[in-house]
Image (cartoon, grey):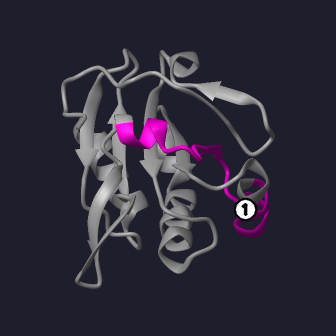
Amino acid sequence: MIEEGTMAPDFSLPCETGESISLSSLRGKKVVLYFYPKDNTPGCTKEACSLRDSIEDLRDLEAEVIGISPDTPESHAAFIRKHSLPFHLLSDPEHKVMEAYGAYGEKTLYGKKTIGVIRSTFIIGSDGTVLKAFRKVNTATHGDDVRKALEKI
């Protein structure tokens, strides 16, 4: 489990265009790294659109948004087009990056224990340090919640 104040694990994953993006390639910028279960589902769409709607404020605070789910780059490309998302979505079908961040494992959904993506977000500083970890996410207000956290950092 990744904690605030520790170094964020580096990774390299394909985005919606098929090209790889690594966390280390974003050094020098703050990164809002969010993990979500599935493209085009109600909660994930609400969360992505909330971040989209806050993107100018997040960029003014010098933060880059990156989403990660198990979906394919093709699915990500369609999700981005459908909802005009102005950020990259990365594909982690084997859950390796999700596991490294504690964003994949046992969770309770509607009172039933399952294994899957644990919706979570990390604000990573320009030096690669985790500045803030969101383990509980309100999908409707997430963009604003991230903005408020960035303002305090």
Q: Which of the two residues, 119 or 153, is positioned nearer the viewer here?
A: 119
Q: Quadrant of residue 141?
A: bottom left
Q: Across the whole image, how many numbered discs are drawn on residues?
A: 1
On screen, residue 131 above or below 92:
above
On screen, residue 89 above or below 43:
above
Q: Which of the two residues, 5 or 141, is positioned nearer the viewer here?
A: 5
On screen, residue 108 above or below 77:
below
Query: Disc 1 designates what residue?
Result: 84
| Kind of residue at disc 1 | Ser
Horizontal side of 40 relative to 142 (left or right) equals: right
Q: Which of the two residues, 41 or 64, is positioned nearer the viewer here?
A: 41
Q: Secondary structure at mark 1?
A: loop
Whole-percent x, y for residue 22 in the image: 58, 24
Q: Determine the residue positioned at 34% across, 38% down.
A: 101
Judge whether residue 50 is colored magenta. Answer: no
Q: Which residues are magenta?
A: 77-99
Whole-percent x, y for residue 117 in the image: 41, 58
Q: Which of the two residues, 86 or 73, is positioned nearer the viewer here?
A: 73
Q: Quadrant of residue 53?
A: bottom right
Q: Determine the residue positioned at 74% across, 59% down.
A: 75
Binning the other alpha carbons within 10 Å of mark 1 as few (below 14), some (14 to 19) or many (20 upward) gives few
Image quadrant containing the C terminus: top left
Whole-percent x, y for residue 36 in the image: 47, 58
